[in-house]
Image: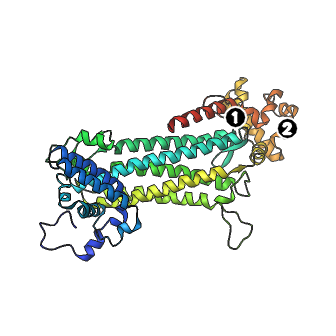
Amino acid sequence: MKLWGGRFESGPSEVFERFSGSLDFDRRLIDADIRGSQAFARALERVGILTSEERAQIVTAFDQILEESSARSFYAGATDEDVHTLVIRKLKERAGAVADKIHTGRSRNEQVSLDTRLWLRDECDRVRGLLCALMGALLKLAGAYPYAVIPGYTHMRRAQAVLWPHYLLAYFEMLARDWERFGEARRRANLLPLGSGALAGSGFPFDRAAIATDLGFEGITANSMDVSADRDFALDFLFAASVTMLHLSRLAEDWILYSSEEFGWMELGDGVTSGSSLMPQKKNPDSLELIRGKSGRVMGCLTSLMVTMKGLPMTYNRDMQEDKVPLFEAGDQLSGSLEMARAVVESVKLHPERPASAAEESWVVATDLAEALARAGTPFHQAHQIVGRFVLESVRGGKKPADWTPEEMRQFAPELTGDMAVLLDPRRGMQSREVPGGTGPEAVASALAAAKERLERMTL
């Protein structure tokens, strides 16, 4: 059946029906479509279009349709244009002629907006739960190795020593911002569009606030034309998804490197790695590589919808039907990647002696020495020059920090007093970085405790 057609002498061609149909992907909205239609039936009763008996008949029929929709056979042979026409056809099969009243005063434009907002609202909640689970896994991994020392990098060169929990907390902060972004995306989507009509507002005196309350929306949209033209709420979700995938991809890149033979810092569990069909020794980080690869797909979904929307005139255009595929694709890939990332985190075994050795044999202590000179009264530019020459002399002589004695340091530069020799141990230099947000042991312990408290609040 069609929701339109009286103005036409003949129906659409077979090729147009195939080209324009969307049931194969928008069927995912069936739960939202039914929930929204049930609320609309109650609104129709309040304005006198439906009697209480008719409303009850329609709502009950919708309940039956929703229950049956979980069966694979429900969609067998369906040739409906989209999920909305499918639902109306099923409603008429169960409720009879009264089903023809359900679309009174409602445009498919606002119906699509409503369904998508309802779906996005639930999806944001689901993603936030997955983010919390991943953040919890990171905190647990941090607690498993609270005193492990690793080199921090800039330009992929060893820069300064940091604690392993401090490194993991950096990703915790990224994911916490992602959690907030999805909360904002949910808030923006959580406005009721019903009552907007096709673009000019409904001709029936619906109590929009009552419908919003019925469906759990925080409020109502302010402009009917904007509703018909708007997909910002979908773009908000796609942007949040893209940034989250960017963060997951960066974590994946780190751990692909850190689990390699060249680094050897960590080992990934057998359950998240795979072998080679030819080379028996291989243990490949495929799970992380797939996360890194899928980030491109999600970012492509954002670009796809942005390009679709950029040149559309006000208000609704059929181009906007193309929002569903990237939206669903991004949601699926994001959820799968978050679940996979959590499994990877839970499988990790750190070999703390390897990154500690990397820190000790390199010159990550150079900044600690320069800052000690500055605290002792040497202007920092001069301190920087002294330590730079000290590192150069060491590199030329093949000396590691631990190879220097206090006496040799003083001979090289009298400013390098004997008590500064302790800073050749990366752990000692970290103790000076107790500012909030720093890698000092006490600062990190406080940050871990605070992160656990924040995560508990997120999951309430």
Q: Amino acid at mark 1?
A: His
Q: Please rate how many residues cluster around mark 2, counting C-alpha atoms within 10 Å: few if below 14, some from 14 to 19, many from 20.
A: few
Residue to which mark 2 is pinned: 404
Identify the residue at the far front of this view. Answer: 53
205 or 141, which lies in front? 205
Residue to which mark 1 is pinned: 384
Residue 331 position in % (x across, y down): 45, 55
393 relative position to 346: left or right = right
Q: Residue at x 71, y 65 (%)?
A: 282
Name the mark nearer the viewer: 1 or 2: 2
Q: Please rate how many residues cluster around mark 1, counting C-alpha atoms within 10 Å: few if below 14, some from 14 to 19, many from 20.
A: some
**Could you tell me which quadrant the N terminus lies in?**
bottom left
Is 173 rendered above or below residue 77? above
| Mark 1: secondary structure | helix
Q: Residue at x 43, y 59 (%)?
A: 329
| Mark 2: secondary structure | loop
158 relative position to 101: left or right = right
Q: CA distance from mark 1 to mark 2?
A: 19 Å
80 relative position to 301: left or right = left
Q: Amino acid at mark 2?
A: Trp
Q: Residue at x 24, y 50 (%)?
A: 56
Residue 295 position in % (x across, y down): 51, 57
Is 430 rendered above or below residue 183? above
Identify the residue at the far bottom of this view. Answer: 14
